[in-house]
Image (spheres, grey):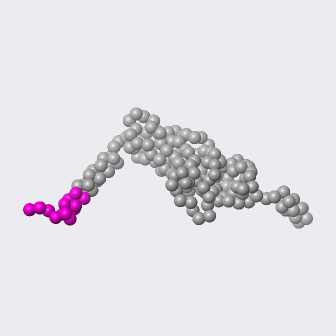
Amino acid sequence: MRMGIIEEWGMEMKRILWGVFVWGYLFVSVPAFGGGMEVDPVDVIVKNCPLGERVAASDLGGNEMILRIQNKDSGSHTYTIDVLSALRTNGRLKPGFLDIPDVSWVRPEHREILIPGNSTGKMELYINVPNVEKYGGKNYQGIIEVKSKKDNPEDIFVLAVQVGLKISTLPVVSETEAVVDADVTREE
């Protein structure tokens, strides 16, 4: 007796799902995969960023804006930190935000960090938006990517986590406005 198309399809789906389950179990159970990593904060948010000054993200957003990378594996791992444009990663821009025009505006304290097993490393981010009028009073969005390196030949996987980056710049103050503000301050 021949099975109907629906029964054949159902049997094929069971085989596929069972195969996915087995491969998923093996993938997660491979010892070289390790315990993974965790990165905080989920979004680095920097408000009131001045133009033409190198500032630490933590100076403008508080200590919670320092990148914390947790190595959940028992062995040491090296992680690289890169800044990417939001559109390069197929990210969607939040309403009111523009893609960061130049990723070199944001620099990690170090491009790489070695973190011992079951430990957390911290990394400061520095922002330097050029003192150009067109960049003032805008909201920019980018991505910070933290990626593990293959430290050992036994390492099978490279892990990567992408963290949101949002920078709001101060509006440009013309020299005339600055002089008027200074005169008002002196009169008070």
Q: Residue at x 25, y 59 (%)?
A: 13
Q: Is residue 150 left or right of residue 88?
A: left
Q: Residue at x 11, y 61 (%)?
A: 2
Extent of the magenta region: 1-13
Figure quadrant of the N terminus: bottom left
Q: Is residue 143 visible?
A: no
Q: Main secondary structure of the magenta part?
A: helix
Q: Is residue 24 left or right of residue 120?
A: left
Of residues 76 and 174, which is closer to you in this image? Answer: 174
Q: Is residue 104 magenta?
A: no
Q: Residue at x 45, y 37 (%)?
A: 150
Figure quadrant of the C terminus: bottom right
Q: Is residue 112 visible?
A: yes
Image x and y of residue 138, in percent: 68, 59
Q: Is residue 12 magenta?
A: yes
- Say how many tags the image has: 0
Q: Residue at x 69, y 57 (%)?
A: 169
Image x and y of residue 153, in percent: 40, 33
Of residues 57 and 6, which is closer to you in this image? Answer: 6
Q: Is residue 162 above or below residue 149?
A: below
Q: Quadrant of residue 34?
A: top left
Image x and y of residue 126, in percent: 65, 47
Image x and y of residue 148, in percent: 47, 42
The outermost residue toward the top is 153
